[in-house]
Image: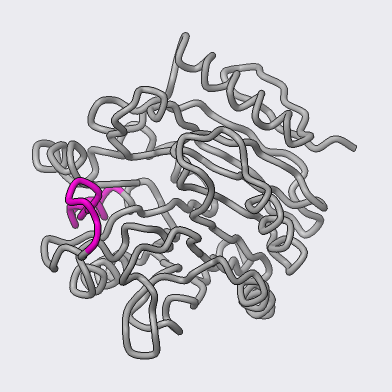
Amino acid sequence: MMFDGDARKLIEAEGGAAPLAAVATSLRSADFTVGNLETPLSNRGTVVAGKPRWLVFEGDPRAVQGLVSAGFDAVSLGNNHMLDHGEIALSDTLTTLDRAGIGRAGAGLTETAAWKPAIVTRNGARVAYLAFTDIVPSGFTPSASNPGVAIGTDMQRVAAAIRSAKQQADYVVVSFHWGVEESYTATPQQVADAHAAVDAGADMVLGHHPHLLQGVEFYNGKLIAYSLGNFVFPYYKPVGHYSAILRAALTPSGTTAASVTPVVLDTAGRPKPATGKDAAAILSRAGVTSRSRATIVTIAGGKAQLKPYR
């Protein structure tokens, strides 16, 4: 979710809830709703050095109204844009999310804070949410006294963080910012790291960064979504406007089914339920990419139902 550019203009015209308004009811109906926040929420800070200006983003802080309205319980800050406007903007983002009661993981004012999970209790169950990024621009690496993102390329450390989170919660959901932009296919590294995360105790793995929908896989009874595409994102290519809402159940015995509801983004990057040819194209692509991960896909009733081969 990127609340800059045309999304910022939309917020200025219609308010902070506008970007997510068309899907808010669907999102908040879940017990636990998460997503990747691709931009800081701030009007302050200094543009990070070393990036082209057109790749530096800062989201309107009023976007938090939409996150609250849509029922987001936690967001990933572990990505390659969270430090685009430096420590001040990151600090503003943390404060804004904390005041709204939205958990966050994957970035912080110190390395320890960046690696700390968000822990949310729902229906008597504790869910720990961890977030990491494999895409790390210059200046995004944290230290004991400097802000940064949780870097996911050291899978031994990631696995240790998952095991630690598992001791604090009933379920662990792990978010990765990884993969190749505009690719429908998960890389061998994505697959290896996702499997390693599940082996370490993750109950669900959710990916982003490629800007396209990649496959959903069931591995050892746990769900892996290699890339969920864009969600609030005025992407410059039409192909990046096809997206989805993934809904799945976490149970003590694992995740045995999930569904994909097609969503299409308008020119401002606003997600809306997809219909007609758009819905058919999204569901078809979700089916192709997920079947390639040995997943049974049934398209009916405007959704794709996903189940593991057994």
Frontmost residue, 232 versus 21: 232
Q: Quadrant of the C terminus?
A: top right
Count of numbered circles on the image: 0
Q: Look at 39% across and 90% down and name the residue there.
A: 144
Q: Look at 32% across and 84% down and name the residue there.
A: 146
Q: Residue furthest right?
A: 310
Is 52 covered by the magenta stretch?
yes
Q: Residue furthest front?
A: 50
Q: Is residue 287 above or below residue 29?
A: above
In the rendering, at what x and y percent does residue 244 appear?
49, 32
The stretch of residues the image draws in magenta is 50-66
In the rendering, at what x and y percent does residue 184 appear?
56, 33
Frontmost residue, 21 versus 275: 275
Answer left or right for 223 relative to 68: right
Determine which quarter of the picture holds residue 85.
bottom left
Is 230 covered by the magenta stretch?
no
